[in-house]
Amino acid sequence: MLLALNDRLVGDLGMYWLFERLRSAPAELRVDDVLGFVARSAREHPEAGRWSETTTLRVAQHYLASLRDCGLARGTRRKVTVRPALYAGPVRLLVRALALAGISGLSALRSPLFRLLALDSAEVIDALGELNGAGALRFRMQADIVELDAERISPTAATTSP
């Protein structure tokens, strides 16, 4: 999550390439597919176009190894995706990052960054509601009014707050 929020290419790989593979887990992850994504997105990522073939290959290999190391894939030579569980920590980090970027309310709920957590737009509200119920963050929504706060709250505060 941190790397994806700090590196646009890694973020785009996560939101637009990895997302579909996580959703259909177990799905095979191939270096050639990552290389194809990087080549197709050269306009958005001109720095990648200046890399040598060796550098581009190493970036793709390290990206896939990182996915395995972070628990989003398994395997050494042949990597296969693992659908991630919903944990409060990464969601709170993402909500805080959106707030720091000045993105709040409905715009935050519609952010493609939630795809980094393998959540499609239809699942974001349910996931935030579940985490609110567990006291992991504050989330309320009525029509198009959204209150979202990534601060952890205690379970008793979740039931006694107005």
Image (spheres, rainbow, N blue to C red):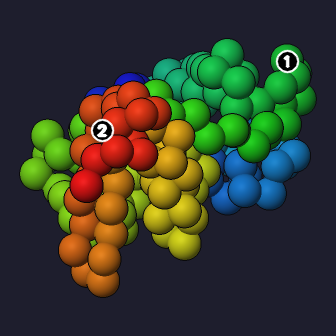
Q: Of residues 131 and 80, which is closer to you in this image? A: 131
The picture places residue 6, in percent across and down from the top left corner, at: 29, 30
Residue lying farthest front? 160
Residue under the point 29% across and 47% down: 161
Q: Residue 68 falls in which quadrant of the image? A: top right
Mark pair 2, 1: CA separation: 35 Å
Looking at the rendered structure, the kind of residue marked 1 is Thr
Is residue 152 visible in the rendered structure shown here? yes
State yes or no: discs 2 and 1 in contact (Cβ < 8 Å): no
Is residue 50 visible in the rendered structure shown here? no
Q: Of residues 152 and 12, which is closer to you in this image? A: 152
The picture places residue 148, in percent across and down from the top left corner, at: 27, 53
Horizontal side of 32 relative to 3 (left or right) equals right
Q: Of residues 26 and 59, which is closer to you in this image? A: 26
Residue pointed to by mark 2:
150
User: Can you say which quadrant of the picture contains the C terminus?
Assistant: bottom left
Secondary structure at badge 1 equals loop
User: Can you say which quadrant of the picture contains the N terminus?
Assistant: top left
With respect to residue 102, does 30 lie above or below?
above
Residue pointed to by mark 1:
76
Estimate how packed mark 2 is, as few (under 14), some (14 to 19) or many (20 or more) residues with alpha carbons within 10 Å. many
Residue under the point 89% across and 29% down: 78
Looking at the rendered structure, the kind of residue marked 2 is Ala
Residue lying farthest left? 102
